[in-house]
Amino acid sequence: MESVPALIRRIAHDWDPQLLVVIPHPVRITKSKLLKTGELERAAGLAALNAGNTGGVLVILDSDDDCPAHLGPELLTRVRTARADLPCAVVLAKREFESWFLASAESLRGYARLPADLEPPDHPEEIPGAKEWLRKRMQTGAYASTVDQPSLTNRFDLTLARRADSFDKCYRDITSLLQVLRARELDPGDAVPEL
């Protein structure tokens, strides 16, 4: 709930530091529920209500064991069918959101209980347990997604993370949504609702 808005703000700032992005309260639904017939469409409707007629719909979820290249387009078709009136994007983190932290591990050295010599794994998106990978490397305590994920989201290097194909797609999809939304605004300095 905190990490995705923070990620959107960081990418927006990286893309255009002058852009003011307003992110309504995210709609959170478990993946298992979201995949059920009608649930993604219902969630897109709620997100659209929150964003208003000048906003967009962004769906971000972990792919877990599903192939993002197969599931992502299917979900995007469903969202676009449900909300043809708004720009939409669907991003699946390959395996887990935390895979993006692994791809940019160098930028997290010495932060959040991680060692100063932290190295990214080969093929970070192929690791089935990114949270566990982080947990094993934390010098004290255990990885807690409610605390550590927002903190690491605000810290990890966006450029390094783009080595992960799913994060590169996430970055491109968010900037594409921002371009569309900004183009719809009369004044580029206006706030751009998102999500």
Image: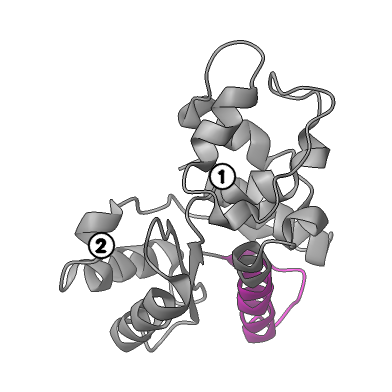
Residue pictured at 42% horizontal, 75% vertical: 72
Q: Name the residue: 43% across, 49% down.
A: 25
Q: Is residue 195 visible?
A: no
Label 2: which secondary element: helix
For the stretch drawn in magenta, what is the main secondary structure?
helix
- The residue under the point 38% across, 70% down is 48
Percent x, y of residue 93: 51, 59
Dot 1 and dot 2 residues touching (CB under 8 Å): no
Residue 34 is marked as: 2
Residue 94 colored in magenta in the image: no
The residue at the far left in this view is 37
Over which residues does the magenta segment extend? 171-193
| Quarter containing the N terminus | top left
Task: Please say which color scheme the image uses.
Answer: one colour
* Total labels drawn: 2
Residue furthest front as drawn:
122
* Residue pointed to by mark 1: 98
Q: Nearer the viewer, residue 183 or 140?
A: 140
Which residue occupies the foreground of this view, 49 or 128? Answer: 128
Task: Give x and y (percent) for residue 79.
Answer: 35, 79
- Secondary structure at badge 1 equals loop
Left or right of residue 169, residue 36 in this image = left
The residue positioned 48% from the left and 42% from the top of the image is 129
What is the three-letter code of the residue carrying label 1?
A: Glu
Discs 1/2, front:
1
